[in-house]
Amino acid sequence: MATNQALVNGFDALGDPTRRAILERLSTGPLAVGELARAMPVSRPAVSQHLRVLKLADLVIDEAVGTRRLYRVNPTGVQMLRKQLDKFWDQALAAYKDAAEAGGD
Amino acid sequence: MQVTEHVVRKSMVIGVPPLRAFDVFTNGFDSWWPRSHHTGEGDLVKAVIEPHQGGRWYAVTTVGEEEWGRVLVWDPPRRIVLDWQLNADFRYDADFHTDVEARFTAEGDSSTLFEFEHRDIERYGDRAEELAAALGSDGGWTGIMNGFAAAAQRPA
């Protein structure tokens, strides 16, 4: 379960253009550090460092596949948004029910 | 792999017949849509759903109009489906589509079973960067929810 702290960190983590570029690359599919580094004008250690920050912010997850470690966008970001939409509609639809039932016939 | 459902579902009974419930949802859209909730510049003046299939649903603001999407199904007083084309950053995106559906079923003489779904939420995952930014920023969901909570508590 993501916390508000993770959300705040997520925002900070995205304050850096290289990290945004890394996320954009990963949104098309999982990649290893080396593949990311080749596709970007930064060194491999720098990419590793950025990935660490993104992982801490719950924006990216990693897994070992054979001898490789693949990084991917954390799908729970979508679940967080789903929760927010859920809350939003709860409140909007409560207002709708009130409006429907308010006199006016 | 855990199966997660990317749908928001709501249902409730409303104490008016379907015709009135449908009318308030659509023609009365502006009377219940949260004032804090619009995407661009200026203040929200009016939220509109055009009453026909293929119509627009949109906002009039103090600086102009904001597209929100299209009316996919217009079937009064039973059903309406909207194409919700607002991305995670609350910007209109012509290439982004999610479905919002409301169904109205008579319950007895004077009540309506209202069933609601917002589907295709997994599509927000294709835009991970703006999703994360929207979730974390005051201009995104957090700010909108705070603003809406405050507005909802004010007397009409």
Image (cartoon, coloured by chain):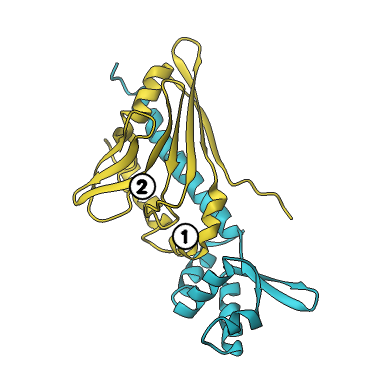
Chain colours: A cyan, B yellow
- Can you say which quadrant of the picture contains the C terminus of chain B? top left
Residue B141 on image: x %, y %: 42, 55
* Numbered disc 1: secondary structure: helix
Quarter of the view holding residue A37: bottom right
Q: Disc 1 or disc 2, which is closer to the eye?
A: 1
Residue occupying image coordinates x 72% and y 53%: B2
Horizontal side of A29 relative to B136 (left or right) equals right
Tag 1: residue type? Leu
Output the chain of dot 1: B
In this rendered view, identify the residue nearer to me: B14 or A17. Answer: A17
Tag 2: residue type? Phe
Mark toward the start of the polypeptide (1 vs 2): 1
- For disc 2, the neighbor class at 10 Å (few under 14, some 14 to 19, many from 20) is some
User: Is any part of residue B153 visible from this angle?
Assistant: no
Residue A32 on image: x %, y %: 67, 77
Residue where numbered disc 1 is placed = B135
Residue where numbered disc 2 is placed = B148
